[in-house]
Amino acid sequence: MIEALRCLPGVGQKSAQRMAYHLLERDRDGARRLGERLAEAMEKVGHCTRCRDFSQAELCAICASPTRDAALLCAVESPADRLAIEQATGYRGLYFVLQGRLSPLDGIGPRELGLERLAARLAEGTVRELIIATNPTVEGEATAHYLAQLARQRKVQPSRIAHGVPLGGELEYIDRGTLSHAFGSRSEVPN
């Protein structure tokens, strides 16, 4: 049980041991529910055939919704990124969940990210703008560059989410890389 719990991100030997002992000593009913829910999720949760997000149906609720703007498509690295955008913004377009980022050293290329499916979707002619919302890491930036080229080849306007100084942040406490990127990506102040 301890070794099985260690498969979770951020859970080391001591944390796994503490969790296992807690479940065995104090919450055996909780452990049974957890086991049942995990088994059920592994059996029933797959991927949306359109956007690759997690879904119990062929199409997730967002892709199936007639109220979403099909001309806007936002590419994100993970389902957690999609959820963050949904919760923090008023975005009403659709998504494409990469389930990772380009990383040749780890064996993750365009095929593993489903980019042939994204290319076909862009070629359909419905999408006008591909919003690229990958993380500002080396791999995320390489993925963003690749996605922008893919979009341009299919006559779709690529855009990149802004990166830089957080709202409410103070310049003296911002790390050098973030401040440098924000300064280099500055834009004109509208009237």
Image (cartoon, rainbow, N blue to C red):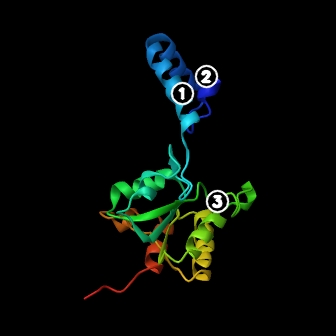
Vertical arrangement, residue 99 with respect to residue 45, above or below: below
Vertical arrangement, residue 3 with respect to residue 161, above or below: above
Q: Nearer the viewer, residue 83 or 154?
A: 154
C-alpha span from label 1 to label 2: 9 Å
Which residue is drawn at the image coordinates 65% and 25% (left, top)?
Answer: 3
Task: Report the residue marked by disc 1.
Answer: 15
What amino acid does circle 2 point to? Answer: Ile
Indicate which disc, 1 or 3, sits on the residue closer to the N terminus. Answer: 1
- Does the CB distance between marks 1 and 2 fall below 8 Å? no
Dot 1: what SS? helix
Task: Report the residue marked by disc 2.
Answer: 2
C-alpha span from label 2 to label 3: 32 Å
What amino acid does circle 1 point to? Answer: Ser
Q: Quadrant of the C terminus?
A: bottom left
Q: Quadrant of the N terminus?
A: top right
| Front tag of 2 and 3 | 3
Indicate which disc, 1 or 2, sits on the residue closer to the N terminus. Answer: 2
Which disc is residue 33 wearing? none
How dense is the environment of label 3, judged by Cα within 10 Å: few (below 14), some, or many (20 and up)?
many
What amino acid does circle 3 point to? Answer: Leu
Residue 9: % across, % down: 57, 39
Which residue is drawn at the image coordinates 52% and 52% (left, top)?
Answer: 53
Residue 14: % across, % down: 57, 25
Residue 93: % across, % down: 40, 66
Vertical arrangement, residue 81 with respect to residue 191, above or below: above
Residue at the top extreme, as displayed: 25
Task: Report the residue marked by disc 3.
Answer: 113
Indicate which disc, 2 or 3, sits on the residue closer to the N terminus. Answer: 2
Dot 3: what SS? loop
How dense is the environment of label 1, judged by Cα within 10 Å: few (below 14), some, or many (20 and up)?
some
Residue at the bottom extreme, as displayed: 191
